[in-house]
Image (spheres, helix red, strand yellow):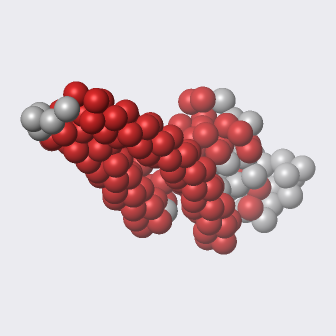
Amino acid sequence: MGIYLLFAFCINICFAYSKFFIIFEHKKAIESLSASTGMAMRNIGITGKLYFTMILLYFRTIIVAVIFLVIPFLISSFLAFLPTIIGIKLFFLIIFLIISIVLFIFIVHLNSTLEIFVEATWYEAYLLCKAEDASSGHHDDHGHHDSHGHNDHHSGHDSHTKHDDHGHHH
């Protein structure tokens, strides 16, 4: 179980930026996963901090949702077992049902707002990582990593000059 969770965390961190590569750079799925993994690894500090902040944020949201939904349920359950008049029990159960529905709608709204915030935050991180990559020269205009042999045009040689097998100009 622990190995699976570690693997899931690694995959989520690596693929965090893939949707932005698909949307803004029109990359195919596999290309975007590769570009996202590269960006996440080059900027692991930013990506890791943001990912774990999001985990804490979602955890907090789950706790708030449980509290908002469990407390009215516990109160209504307590009232149902009190030896009182059936009409009073029914009245309180309906009141707490209405309160629970209102709180549920509130939680759904909070979750929607949270998702918008999360996407905006990941987008800001994507832009920050793109700026970091551009300032450190990690990729060329095709999105490839410079250490992959795409530097031939930077050698200072005229591309129209012919070379023999020994590197001499002709």
| Front residue (pair 166, 130) | 130
Spot occupied by residue 45 in the image (x, y as percentages of width and height): 42, 66
Where does the N terminus fall, quadrant-wise? top left
Whole-percent x, y for residue 144 in the image: 63, 48
Residue in view at x 26 percent, y 47 percent: 71
Outermost residue on the bottom side: it is 135
Q: Which residue is drawn at 29% across and 44% down?
A: 72
Question: In this rendering, does residue 56 appear at all?
Answer: yes
Residue 134 versus residue 21: which sits nearer the camera? 21
The residue under the point 73% across, 43% down is 25
Residue 77: image x %, image y %?
18, 36
- Indicate left or right for 122 with 97 as reference: right
109 sits left or right of 74 in the view: right
In the rendered image, the residue lying farthest to the right is 160
Instruction: State the count of labels.
Output: 0
Residue 129 falls in which quadrant of the image? bottom right
Q: Quadrant of residue 125?
A: bottom right
Q: Where does the image place residue 63, in percent across and percent down from the top left? A: 29, 52
Front position in the image: 148 or 85: 85
Residue nearest the viewer, comparing 28 with 53: 53
Is 9 on the left or on the right of 83, as rendered? right
- Residue 115 seen in the current view: no
Q: Residue at x 67, y 37 (%)?
A: 22
The answer to which quarter of the image holds residue 157 is bottom right
Position of residue 26 in the picture relative to residue 71 (left or right):
right
